[in-house]
Structure formats: C-alpha cells, structure tokens
C-alpha cells in the first residue's frame, strides 16, 4: 500500500509519467490540468514517498542485437534461507537476467534472460547459471514472439470501474 493517499490528480500524474517520463513539468502540468508549481510539488512528494523511485530509458532489444528472450525455471537442491540468498545474490550479478522471481510450484525461481543468440544462451547456462552453488535443475522455454509488454502499472482511478481502466499502448 502507498504510504501517502493518492487523489485523482496524483494518479493522472503517475499515468502520464509512466507513459513518458521525459515530459517537462510544464507539459505534465498542462496534461493534468494544474499550474506548474503545484504539479512540481506533487511530483516531488511522489518521489520523496518512494512511489516514484527512478526514471529509466527503455531500449529496443532487437535494435541492439538481443533477439533471444528465454524464460528459465531453476530448481535448487535445498530451499533453505542460505541457499535462496546465495542464488539471489549470484543471479543479481548477471546483466542478461532481466527479471527474477521466487516461485511456488515445481521451480524455485523463474528468470527471464535476453541474449544475442543461442550460443550466448548456451554460454550463460553452462558457464554461469549451472555453476551457481545449489542449482539442481534448469529448464528453458524460448519466447517465440512478444505479444504484450508494458512497463506501466495499472492504476485504478477513483470513480472508475476496475475493469474499465484507461487503455493505452505502452
């Protein structure tokens, strides 16, 4: 839960910044129907609360030659705190690992890896992933096509039915 109450204007600010974090304060203020000074104060309050914790630039992986996206399920030998911590510390060091989730079910972790080609994936699995202490099993699934990808979180605005969230391409 957010540490600060969010009103409709805060939610509009967050929507706009999720869509384009490069908006100037003047542009943002116009889009949310505020004057620039109160808009900037609200953005700073959202940043200070930790709700906005950073701004990033999203790159096109294909244009960078990173055309292989793989989901890898990892099972550890033991699911004790030390083993989980050791795996998490190790996996955080690899730049090709885009996401890592501790899971329930058959696998302990699910990671998403982005690499240039199959040979790069093989090197990653053989030379890196399989050498992390405690890794018992590795299963990979290749993404053939990215059907949906978004970075903006779904924000429910007051007086807006849950199923009718504002639709945008992100």
Image: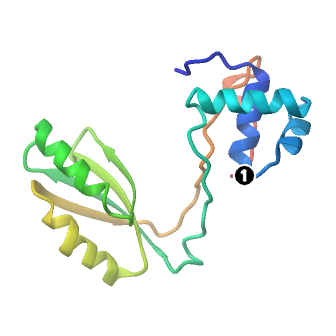
Residue 131: x %, y % from top left? 13, 66
Q: Is residue 144 above or below residue 11?
A: below
The colouring scheme, among rainbow, by chain, secondary structure or one colour, is: rainbow
Residue 130: x %, y % from top left? 16, 66
Q: Residue at x 59, y 49 (%)?
A: 151
Residue 79 visible: no
Residue topped by disc 1: 169
Q: Is residue 4 above or below residue 10?
A: above
Left or right: 18, with 66 as reference point: right
Between 116 and 2, the one lying in front of the other is 2
Q: Residue at x 69, y 32 (%)?
A: 44
Q: Is residue 16 above or below residue 148?
A: above
Total marks in image: 1
Between 78 and 4, the one lying in front of the other is 4
Residue 40 visible: yes
| Quarter of image, res 167 | top right
Residue 33: x %, y % from top left? 91, 30
Secondary structure found at label 1:
loop
Left or right: 21, with 69 as reference point: right
Q: Is residue 88 above or below residue 30?
A: below
Residue 2: x %, y % from top left? 56, 21
Between 60 and 21, the one lying in front of the other is 21
Question: Mark 1 packing: few (<14 Cα in 10 Å), some, or many (20+)?
Answer: few
Q: Residue at x 72, y 43 (%)?
A: 17
Left or right: 126, with 101 as reference point: left
| Quarter of image, res 40 | top right
Q: Residue at x 72, y 33 (%)?
A: 43
| Quarter of image, res 70 | bottom left
């Amino acid at each position: 839960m957010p540490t600060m109450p969010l009103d409709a204007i805060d939610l509009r600010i967050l929507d706009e910044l999720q869509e384009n974090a490069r908006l100037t304060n003047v542009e943002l203020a116009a889009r949310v129907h505020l004057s620039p000074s109160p808009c900037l104060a609200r953005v700073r309050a959202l940043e200070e609360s930790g709700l906005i914790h950073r701004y990033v630039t999203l790159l096109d992986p294909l244009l960078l030659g990173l055309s292989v996206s793989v989901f890898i399920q990892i099972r550890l030998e033991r699911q004790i705190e030390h083993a989980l911590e050791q795996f998490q510390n190790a996996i955080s060091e690899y730049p090709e690992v885009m996401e890592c989730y501790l899971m329930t079910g058959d696998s302990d972790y699910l990671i998403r890896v982005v690499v240039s080609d199959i040979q790069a994936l093989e090197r990653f699995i053989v030379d890196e992933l399989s050498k992390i202490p405690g890794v018992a099993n590795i299963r990979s699934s290749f993404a053939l096509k990215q059907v949906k990808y978004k970075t903006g979180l779904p924000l429910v605005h007051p007086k807006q039915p849950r199923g009718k969230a504002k639709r945008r391409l992100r």
